[in-house]
Structure formats: C-alpha cells, structure tokens
Amino acid sequence: MERFIFLDFDGVLSTGRYQRELQARGETLRDALGPRFDPQAVDALRMLLKRSGAQLVITSSWRTAGLATMRNLWHSRSLPGEVVGITSFYLFGAYCSSPQEEPFMGFTPGCRGLEIAEWLTRHAEPDASYVILDDEEDFLLQQASRLVRINPETGLTPTDARKAMVVLY
C-alpha cells in the first residue's frame, strides 16, 4: 500500500525554539535555501519515514519554487526520505471585507485540503494511506482524522511521529 506524508515546513521543521537557539548562539538563521531546519524535528521525521516507508509530498508555501528546487533542498541539506511531489498552489483572487471597501489587489492562499485532495486524485492509488503534518488547520473536514497538528514552537516531535504512524496504519 502506498503511504504519503504531506509536509509543511514552517512550524514543522523550522521551529520557533530552534530559531531562538541559533540567534542566542549568534549563528545564522538561514542558509542560501531559507530558514534552517531544527535537527530534532528532522530526526523525528527521519524516524517516521524509516518506520513507515512513506514518501513525501511538500505542501509548504516553499513549494512555489517548484519540485526541482524542493528536491535540491532535500539533497543539499541531506534530509531523510524522498520528495515525490508537491501539491498545486491554489490562489483566490481579489477580495474585500465590506461592500464599501476597495478590493485587496493581491492574492490569498487557497485551501491546502483541496490541494491535497487534488494531488491524491491525480497521483495516488485509491487505497493510499496518508498523514498531514502541519501547524495550521486549513484542511477539509474529511481530512481531520489524517491531520497531526504540530506545535510551531517545538516542531515535529517523536510523539507527533508516533501519532502519524497510527494514522498511516
């Protein structure tokens, strides 16, 4: 059976705790690819991947740089697992908060739940198992049991990884 981990970065691998730790030590918070990932969160991901055999699909906003860039990030940072895909990036157009207000001329992010549902429809077998690792809850109601909500302060922990294993199996 196919198994997938839909992975966010900010708040899952890039944590508030680690960023403050780097700052206190006077170390750089970023490398050429973006904010540095918390080694403890990466270790928890490594454990989850080793035990589950799951493949990674990136849902992070970083994915807008493209699949090749995500794979390069994975290789450059010697991260665990294999990135097999990125979800589509839906954008909703202009909006305003009242009829009298001028429309906001930017874009707002779409629903990650819809992006995940589309990816599964296009790329996975119907019986595929998956888990969503994210610090937010922008998902479909039918995906609620698949979400392991991560504390953005600590990022992915071994406890979260064990919860994800239960979801995958």
Image (cartoon, grey):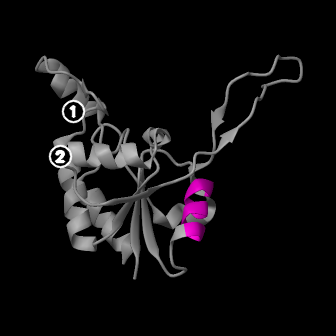
**Residue designated by label 2:** 40
Q: Which mark is residue 18?
A: 1
Q: Is residue 115 magenta?
A: yes
**Dot 1: within a 10 Å radius of its alpha carbon, few (fewer than 14), some, or many (20 or more) residues?**
many
Please state the horizontal and vertical placement of residue 135, each as a whole percent of the image: 42, 45
Type of residue at label 1?
Answer: Tyr
**Is residue 136 left or right of 163 when viewed as pictured?**
right
**Is residue 79 left or right of 103 when viewed as pictured?**
left
Q: Is residue 88 above or below residue 106?
A: below
Residue 148 can be seen, yes or no = no
Residue stretch in magenta: 114-122
Please state the horizontal and vertical placement of residue 154, each as a whole percent of the image: 27, 41
**Is residue 77 left or right of 155 when viewed as pictured?**
left
Type of residue at label 2?
Answer: Gln
Please state the horizontal and vertical placement of residue 37, each as a whole percent of the image: 25, 39
Do residues under tags 2 and 1 come within 8 Å of each other at their CB atoms?
yes
Tell me what residue is drawn at x 62 percent, y 56 percent: 114
Mark 1 secondary-structure assignment: helix
Q: Is residue 43 magenta?
A: no
- Between residue 58 and residue 45, name the one nearer to us: 58
Please state the horizontal and vertical placement of residue 23, each as a whole percent of the image: 19, 20
